[in-house]
Image: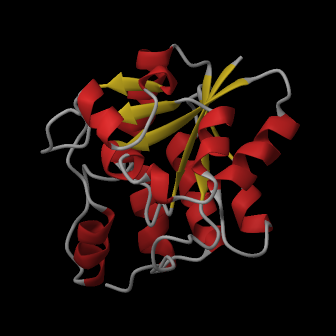
Amino acid sequence: MKLGVLGGTFDPIHLGHLAAAEAAVECADLDQVVFVPTGTPPHRPSAMASGEQRLEMCRLATAGDPRFTVSNIELERAGPSYTLDTLLALRGANPHAEMFLVLGWDAASQLRSWYRPDEVLGLAPVIVITRPGRAAPTIDDVKTAGLDPARVILCPRPTPSVSGSELRRDLMAGRPVAGRVPDAVEHYIATHHIYGG
């Protein structure tokens, strides 16, 4: 089985995340993508929504698509959420799977600054999804970022331009977010008043 791993704060999960997962399935012929909400991200501030809320939003967003699954592996683990630890744990749970790490180019270009990046790349080649409004990276860009092109799959598929920070601002201001998050997620946010508004 070919398993893609898509981590993120998912605060909230939106249609851009789902499109990235679909692009990864197409580009690398994946059987499944597991969405992994971050626990304590080492590179960015904590999420506004709780871990349980972000996990539930991911479950709602991916329900009904057999290609997608959700893992609470980082939310259950204490300390910083390092990708290496997550990949090792997922490999332990899926010993026969071939794993791939699904990243936007903004994250992939910074992978060298991560915790033990060579071990991360050794466990899982990277599927690089082009971010909306940015040029698709080239093999030269991959090399400049210090990545081995043999361990990178470039996936220049168009994905919708949706930003988590913009969504949170709109939700806090009471502005509509329809068409940018799945309907079930929009309903869950409204019901639980997650971002105020």
Look at the image and tell me whether residue 137 can be seen.
Answer: yes
Q: Where does residue 10 sit, x and y in percent of width and height?
A: 48, 60
Q: Is the residue 93 above or below the residue 106 in the image?
A: above
Q: Residue at x 66, y 65 (%)?
A: 81
Q: With respect to residue 43, does 68 lie above or below?
A: above
Q: Measuring 51% from the left and 26% from the top, which residue is drawn there? A: 151
Residue 38 lies left or right of residue 98; in this view the side is left
Give residue 164's position: percent from left, percent from top: 33, 64
Q: Quadrant of the N terminus?
A: top right
**Residue 140: horizontal and vertical position, in percent?**
25, 29
Q: Quadrant of residue 187?
A: bottom left
Above or below, 148 against 112 in this view is: above
Percent x, y of residue 126: 50, 33
Please name whichever residue, 166 or 7, is drawn nearer the observer in this view of the structure.
Answer: 7
Residue 135 higher or lower than 60, as above or below: above
Q: Assign the C terminus to one quadrant of the image.
A: bottom left
- Return the residue nearer the eye: 111 or 90: 111
Q: Count every numbered label the image shows and give the total.
A: 0
| Quarter of the rendering containing residue 144 | top left
